[in-house]
Image (cartoon, grey):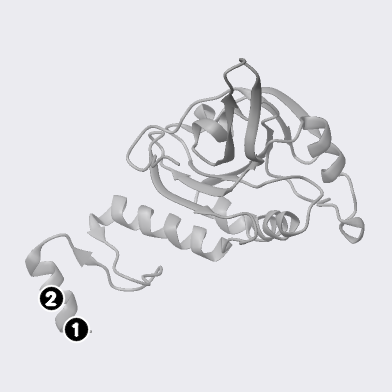
Amino acid sequence: MCTLVGKKAPSFKATAVVNGNDFVNEFSLEQFIGNKYVVFFFYPLDFTFVCPTEILAFQEKLAEFEKRNVAVVGCSVDSEFSHWAWLNTEKNNGGIKGVKFPLVADLTKTIAENYGVLAGEYQVNEEGESSFVGAPVAYRGLFLIDKKGNVRHQLVNDLPLGRSVDEALRMVDALAHFEEFGEVCPANWKEGDEAMKASAEGVASYLSKH
């Protein structure tokens, strides 16, 4: 597991399914640099149980992300054809029809590996035979990437543990607030709350009011 916070987000070009139906070759997060924040999240597999609850939750809040100038992008180790089939399966049959944000295909697992969320690794024995040890899927990783392409927030959950979409929105708000006002955001801060100046005097002033 690696920490990417403070570093450039690993670049990639891969096939993605966009708007629920369109195949886009050589999809890259670099298209958003200078223009949008990116919430890039990994999930283990298509056609599973916890994964659709997360993906549909992101779709339900997609307008909130877009209002904040954020591109939401999902990724798993499935193929683009699996993504397409899942995106075109009705919800009452286990599908995620209606999801519009891009789903990236990482069939080679290299994107998950480069982001440090692959739930296992390839090992070679003394005979030179390669095998995968662990689960050949991605953990539930989430990365908030700023407009310069730098990772500013990273969260990785184990496979059974779903994420909070509201927390992802809160992190976007905190980053935007810091960038606009130069104020740091204390524990449990949310948009509209008082923040702090990044100085001893600023912290003391904030604490004296709470």
Q: Is residue 73 above or below residue 56?
A: above
Name which residue lies at 50% across and 60% down. Answer: 169
User: Residue 97, image x and y in percent?
Assistant: 84, 50
Pointer 1: residues within 10 angstroms few (<14), some, or many (20+)? few
Q: Which quadrant is the C terminus positioned in?
A: bottom left
Q: Amino acid at mark 2?
A: Ser
Q: Amino acid at mark 1?
A: Lys
Residue in the foreground of this view, choosing between 28 and 177: 28
Residue in the foreground of this view, choosing between 89 and 32: 89
Question: Where on the picture, by quarter, is residue 122?
Answer: top right
* SS category of the residue bearing label 2: helix
User: Residue 57, image x and y in percent?
Assistant: 67, 61
Q: Which residue is mark 2?
A: 205
Name which residue lies at 38% across and 37% down. Answer: 150
User: Residue 156, image x and y in percent?
Assistant: 51, 52
Do the CB atoms of the residues marked 2 and 1 lie less than 8 Å apart?
A: yes
Q: Which quadrant is the N terminus positioned in?
A: top left
Q: Is residue 24 left or right of residue 138?
A: right
Q: Is residue 121 above or below residue 96?
A: above
Q: Which residue is mark 1?
A: 209
Q: Is residue 172 left or right of residue 123?
A: left
* SS category of the residue bearing label 1: loop
